[in-house]
Structures are given as C-alpha cells and as structure tokens.
Image (tube, rainbow, N blue to C red):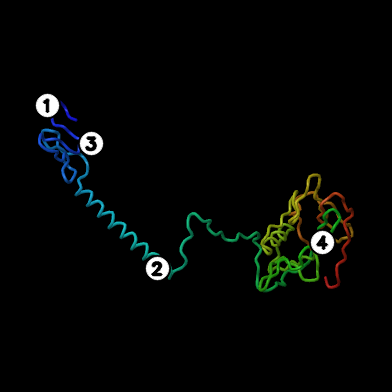
C-alpha cells in the first residue's frame, strides 16, 4: 500500500497508516495533502472556496430570475413577448403592386380596356370585383356585371400595362396571378402548350399577334387583349363589342 520504509496509503490516497491507526491524508478543506513527511497544497480549490463560488452562483441566478420576472411584467404592459427563436417569425404581407388603393374612384383619367383569357378554347372567368374592396379602389379595377372590362381610373396620366393589372389582381386577392411564358393567372402551361397574345386596338385592323412579353402590353382605351393557351388556337380570337356608355 506504500513504499518500503515509508507510510502506507489507502488505494485512493485519502488515508495513511501512522503505525497505530489510519489517519486522513487530506485536510478537511481539501487544500492540503499529507505526502508522508509533510503537508503540501493539493493545487485544487478548497472547500471554503467551493462554498464561496457556489454562493456567488446562487446570487447570480437569483438576480437573473428577478430581472426576468421584472422584464416580463414590464412587457405585459408594453406589448406581446417576442416569439421564441424556435418559432418562425411572422412576416409582413409584401405588396405585389405599387399602384395605390384609394378610398374613392378617380375621374381625372378614366378609360377602359378589355381582357379575355382562353384555355384550350374555353373562356377563363376573371372575377368582376378585381381591384375593389370596401373603401379600397385600385387605379386599375373591374366592376360587377362587366366581365373582362378593366377600368383605368387614375388621378394622373401615366402608362399602365397588362402586367400592372395582374399585379393589382395579385395584391387584391392575396394570391399571385402570374403572366409569363409558362403561366397565365393561376394556370400553368403543360408540356407542348404555348401562350399566344393578341391585341385589337379597335381601329378596324382586327386582332394582331403580340410577340413580346405580354406583361408589357400597354393598356389603351377600347383595346381588346386576348391571352390564349394553345393548342388548339382560336384565330381570330372571339370578338367583343363594347356596351353602350363605354
């Protein structure tokens, strides 16, 4: 248990044999150890220090608890608590259009264009209240019982495009209404299908194929716009006659 001629220690060296009885080899505070000849420092923390450190930790934790309780109490009066980092933060609604929604309709600039959408020869319904809510009138909107007729009612003379109308449609309904080579409104073109666009300026020239980006079609008075998912193709597009008063 020990070296020949030297003191005998227990296996964990916590006790030593003094020739008559087992004696503690470590001081009560754990700071000193008997090496068989003299007491030497263990190099570790004494029990006194351990007690002091533990007390300090308790004080810090108590202070943190008081701070947290105070913070919660204050925020109960000031507003809701922040969302936990483990939960997704709510995101603000991102507008699809820069065109305003005003409380009243404008009359400074007022004209009309017509839009029809065909999907393999069948007409696609466009809501007739697009761009209108209670106390909300976008500068581009439609009216009840006037299917397909876009009202352009703006306080200033500026250029509006078919893309602007689709953006208003998206913002008004809260659902993206796309217009590109693969989408028309919420329709997605299948393999082998194509989008054909026609513009009739109501000048006697009839519907003319539009080869550019359909979003860039400028809205003009009495213009008739046809978006058609083909095949089959309906050419010329269905005719439209403007109602009296337009």
Q: Are marks 2 and 4 in contact (CB under 8 Å)?
A: no
- 115 and 61: which is toward the camera: 61
Crowding around mark 1 (Cα neighbors within 10 Å: few <14, some 14 to 19, many 20+) is: few
- Label 3 CA crowd tier, 10 Å (few <14, some 14–19, many 20+): few
Q: Position of residue 241 (x, y in %)?
A: 88, 65
From mark 1 to mark 3, how far is it between C-alphas? Answer: 20 Å
Nearer the camera: disc 4 or disc 1:
1
Q: Residues within 10 Å of mark 4 (few under 14, many from 20)?
A: many
Q: Position of residue 30 (x, y in %)?
A: 19, 43
State the separation of the CA atoms marked 3 and 4: 99 Å
Residue 46: mark in rendering = none
Q: Where is residue 12 drawn, in percent x and y?
A: 23, 36
* Badge 2: residue crowd in 10 Å (few <14, some 14–19, many ≥20): few
Which is closer to the viewer, label 3 or label 4? 3
Q: Quadrant of the N terminus?
A: top left
List the residue tagged with mark 2: 74
Q: CA distance from mark 1 to mark 2?
A: 72 Å
CA separation in Å, label 2 and label 4: 61 Å
Image marks 3 and 4: residues in contact by CB distance under 8 Å: no
Ranked by sequence position, the earlier of labels 2 and 3 is 3
Q: Which of the 4 quarters of the picture holds residue 226?
A: bottom right
Q: Nearer the viewer, residue 36 or 191?
A: 36
Q: Which residue is mark 1?
A: 5
Instruction: Kindly state the secondary structure of the residue where label 1 is placed.
Output: loop
Locate the C terminus by quadrant: bottom right
Please tell me in which quadrant of the rendered image residue 122 appears: bottom right
**Outermost front residue:** 20
Q: Is residue 146 above or below residue 39?
A: below
Where does residue 178 sit, x and y in percent of width and height?
Answer: 71, 55
Disc 4: which residue:
223
The answer to whether mark 1 and mark 2 are in CB contact below 8 A is no
**Residue 12 marker:** 3
């Amino acid at each position: 248990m020990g070296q020949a001629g030297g003191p005998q220690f227990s296996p964990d060296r916590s006790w030593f044999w003094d020739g008559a009885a087992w004696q503690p080899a470590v001081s009560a505070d754990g700071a000193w150890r008997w090496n068989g000849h003299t007491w030497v420092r263990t190099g570790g923390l004494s029990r006194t220090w351990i007690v002091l450190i533990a007390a300090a930790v308790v004080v810090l934790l108590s202070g943190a608890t008081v701070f947290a309780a105070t913070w919660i109490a204050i925020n109960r009066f000031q507003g809701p608590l922040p969302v936990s980092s483990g939960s997704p933060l709510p995101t603000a609604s991102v507008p699809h259009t820069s065109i305003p929604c005003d409380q009243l309709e404008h009359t400074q600039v007022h004209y009309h264009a017509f839009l029809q959408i065909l999907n393999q020869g069948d007409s696609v319904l466009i809501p007739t209240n697009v761009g209108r809510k209670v106390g909300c009138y976008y500068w581009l909107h439609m009216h009840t019982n006037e299917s397909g007729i876009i009202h352009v009612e703006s306080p200033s003379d500026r250029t509006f495009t078919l893309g602007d109308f689709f953006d208003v449609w998206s913002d008004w309904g809260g659902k993206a209404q796309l217009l590109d080579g693969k989408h028309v409104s919420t329709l997605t073109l299948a393999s082998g299908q194509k989008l054909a666009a026609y513009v009739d300026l109501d000048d006697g020239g009839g519907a003319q194929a539009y080869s550019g980006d359909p979003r860039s079609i400028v809205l003009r008075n009495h213009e008739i716009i046809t978006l058609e998912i083909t095949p089959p193709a309906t050419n010329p597009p269905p005719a439209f006659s403007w109602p009296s008063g337009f």
